[in-house]
Amino acid sequence: MEIVILAVVIAVVVIGVLGGLIVGSRRKRPLPPAPPTPPDITAPPAEPHVGDEAETPRDEERRTIEEVDLPDGPAVVVVEEPPTVEAPPIEIPEPTAGRLIRLRTRLSRSQNALGKGLLTLLSREHLDDETWEEIEDTLLTADVGVQPTQELVERLRERVKVLGTRTPEELRALLRDELLQLVGTSMDRTVRTEPETSKPGIVMVVGVNGTGKTTTTGKLARVLVADGRTVVLGAADTFRAAAADQLQTWGERVGAHTVRGPEAGDPASVAFDAVKEGKEMGADVVLIDTAGRLHTKTGLMDELGKVKRVVEKHAPLDEVLLVLDATTGQNGLVQARVFAEVVDISGIVLTKLDGTAKGGIVVAVQRELGVPVKLVGLGEGADDLAPFEPEAFVDALIGD
């Protein structure tokens, strides 16, 4: 029995050994090692560690930067700095003294017809009623006006009767005296820009569209700068496109500061700010350019009155200049009347006087408003605005 048990045990042990050998032979073989990952050519080279030896330099010849082909990549954007815009140089305006006399030739080209016509008629041997009617027509055609024409003809008739014989020199002197009396030599034609109490002097420029009002304001700034004054410009014409730009350009040319507001903004607010800044800067004069208004639009005329009232909260206006186009003739008188009702006109600027033969408008508008012509425009040039001088004007009328 014991022998049987021993045999069974030996058999079990033998079977176990054989099973282990079979299982061990069936185990999975280990996977072969993965191939090495190729280096990333786009990655930057690794930094050397302490103790690493530097790579032995190659002996091959180095290439220049022009010979190296750069890899394709995003284009390099070169940001250029904006060009520096230099401020325009400050101009030195032409002195105002005797400016109208220097422009006399230009004025005489247009006005000489009136004087020559009158001298020709007065030189006739017999001055009958028909001749005097022709003299009247000549004056009326030149826009002198009915009342001033009648007065001038009456005085001429009396003086010619007393004079008797009439040489050309005597007639010229006679006509010059009468025209000077008609134009007026006793009126104060100074543009008031120096208040008695404190600076700045405040000048408001008004007029209808197309008379050259903004240009006149810019030219007046040049006249004042030429006389050694500092000027602030108020661009209160906020309704006309580019009016503020135009005025600012005029100011920059002579170093005048311009105050402006948003397009279609409140003109009275701009005018108020201009006077305020003029005071703060210690400027001598503030020129306010208002919107060109059609005299038939009551609402806009009321707004002009508002601008005047708002400005006078700072200080009283020293001058209100009405700009009239001399080529409009008698129609300019209608405009003048309406403006005089809204603001107290203190002086007249006649533009384009060199473009019309109707110089008599000087007489007519002075009679209509009871205020003097103080400035005249005689061309497109920047310095073609001149203080009005009666003697130079009459000499241009009758020629040499």
Image (spheres, rainbow, N blue to C red):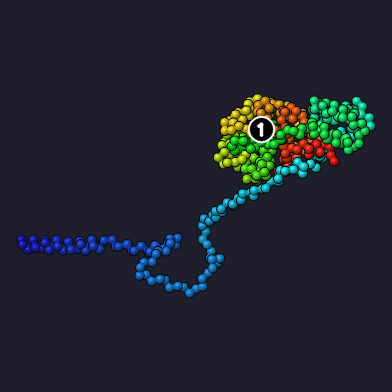
| Location of residue 180 (image quadrant) | top right
Quick one: which residue is furthest to the front in this view? 162
Name the residue at the left extreme. 1
Left of 397 or right of it: where is 211? left
Q: Which residue is mark 1?
A: 320
Task: Tell me: residue 62, above or below residue 154.
Answer: below
As drawn, 68 above or below 90: below
Q: Residue at x 38, y 66 (%)?
A: 48
Give the quarter of the figure containing the N terminus.
bottom left
The answer to whether any part of residue 262 appears in the image is no
Q: Residue furthest bottom?
A: 59
| Nearer to the camera, 190 or 230 | 190
- Residue at left offset 83%, top offset 26%: 150
* Location of residue 166 in the rendering, given as x and y in whole percent from the top left corner: 91, 34
Q: Amino acid at mark 1?
A: Val
**Residue 44 picture location, percent across and down:** 43, 62
Lateral position of residue 300 relative to residue 103, left or right: left
**Point 65% across, 37% down: residue:** 193
* Image: 250 above or below 328: below
Q: Quadrant of residue 253?
A: top right
Sort mark 1 into few (<14), some (14-19) or many (20+) by Cα contacts within 10 Å.
Answer: many
Front-lying residue, 248 or 108: 108
Look at the image and tell me in which quarter the C terminus lies. Answer: top right
Horizontal and vertical percent for residue 236?
A: 61, 35
Q: Nearer the viewer, residue 370 or 276?
A: 370
The reply to whether residue 374 is in sight is yes
* Label 1 secondary element: strand
Q: Choose top left, top right, bottom left or bottom right for residue 295.
A: top right
Towards the viewer: 184 or 8: 184
The picture places residue 184, in percent across and down from the top left corner, at 77, 32
